[in-house]
Image (spheres, rainbow, N blue to C red):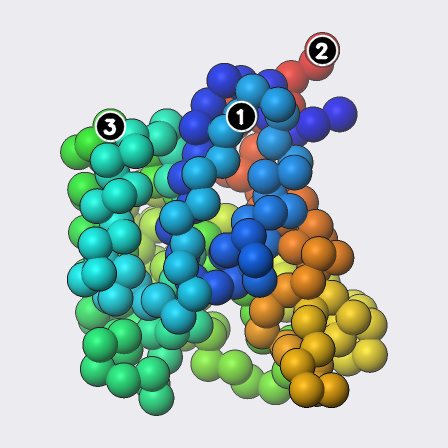
């Protein structure tokens, strides 16, 4: 049984780990009921800052979806350059607050999603951004899907060898950030399940 049975439009705003090509977007859409339309605006290489600066967020607002799922963090980290970097303690939170405020002003219900874990089995620095997203969600009374916590637990259960099978291989080396079809299905289903949990109106309904 599919998780959603409502005629709704759900937009996705995020980086490459949210796209259909290398993230959980395609797997997420596959778990929507036929009448639920998923609009994926995620762009590879974007951060919470550059996604706005380049005008991608304006396209999300113009589409007027019912809900928007927002996930950034990977490209907000240090080393990505001034056009993308944000500070999880300040600018990242300020940008997320702006996303929430502008979505609501446009009649769109925002849902924050913490970053997909990197499958490196060492500190990936994304925990700081996940904690910032949790704080913003709590402070602005916004539903939160804690994908970082759930994906980290799932990856730790898999172990490195199995975790390497859910991402692409580039030049003979496993890509431990992005997803292949199996990875998209795994984490897309996870996001869909969590969305039904944090937004009760979207819980599965009996046929």
Relative side of 147 to 184, left or right: left
Per the image, the residue denoted by label 1 is 36
Residue at (56% x, 20% y) in the render? 35
**Tag 3 near tag 1, CB within 8 Å:** no
Q: Nearer the viewer, mark 2 or mark 1?
A: 1
**Disc with the residue nearer the chain's start (2 vs 1):** 1
* Secondary structure type for disc 1: loop
Q: Which residue is drawn at the image coordinates 46% and 59% (left, top)?
A: 114
- Graded by Cα atoms within 10 Å as few (under 14), some (14 to 19) or many (20 or more), the crowding at tag 3 reads few
Q: Viewer-proximal residue, 68 or 90?
A: 68
Closest to the observer, 136 or 185: 185
Residue projecting furthest to the top:
207
First along the sequence among labels 3 and 1: 1
Quadrant placement of the N terminus: top right
For residue 192, say whether it is visible: no
Quadrant position of the C terminus in the picture:
top right
* Spatial separation of the CA atoms under disc 3 and disc 1: 18 Å
Q: Look at the numbered disc 2 and give the secondary structure of its residue.
A: loop
Which residue carries the number 2 mark?
207
Residue drawn at x 27%, y 78% as measured from the top left: 85
For label 3, the SS is loop
The residue tagged 3 is 107
Mark 1, Cα crowd under 10 Å, few <14 / some 14-19 / many 20+, is some
Q: Earlier in the sequence, mark 3 or mark 2?
A: 3
Q: Give the residue at the far front of this rendering.
A: 171
**In the displayed structure, does residue 199 sit left or right of residue 46?**
right
Image-based side of 122 in relation to 124, left or right: right
């Amino acid at each position: 049984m599919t998780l959603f049975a409502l005629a709704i439009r759900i937009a996705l705003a995020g980086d490459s780990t949210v796209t259909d090509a290398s993230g959980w977007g395609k797997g997420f859409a596959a778990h929507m009921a036929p009448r639920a339309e998923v609009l994926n605006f995620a762009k590879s290489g974007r951060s919470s800052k550059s996604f706005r600066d380049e005008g991608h967020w304006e396209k999300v607002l113009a589409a007027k979806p019912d809900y928007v799922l927002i996930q950034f963090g990977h490209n907000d980290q240090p080393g990505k350059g001034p056009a993308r970097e944000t500070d999880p303690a300040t600018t990242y939170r300020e940008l997320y607050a702006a996303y929430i405020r502008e979505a609501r002003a446009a009649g769109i219900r925002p849902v924050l999603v913490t970053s997909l874990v990197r499958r490196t089995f060492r500190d990936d620095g994304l925990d700081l951004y996940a904690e910032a997203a949790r704080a913003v969600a709590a402070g602005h009374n916004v539903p939160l899907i804690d994908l970082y916590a759930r994906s980290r637990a799932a990856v730790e259960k898999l172990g490195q060898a199995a975790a390497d099978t859910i991402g692409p291989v580039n030049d003979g080396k496993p890509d431990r950030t992005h997803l292949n079809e199996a990875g998209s299905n795994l984490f897309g289903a996870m996001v869909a399940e969590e969305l039904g949990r944090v937004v009760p109106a979207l819980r599965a309904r009996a046929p």
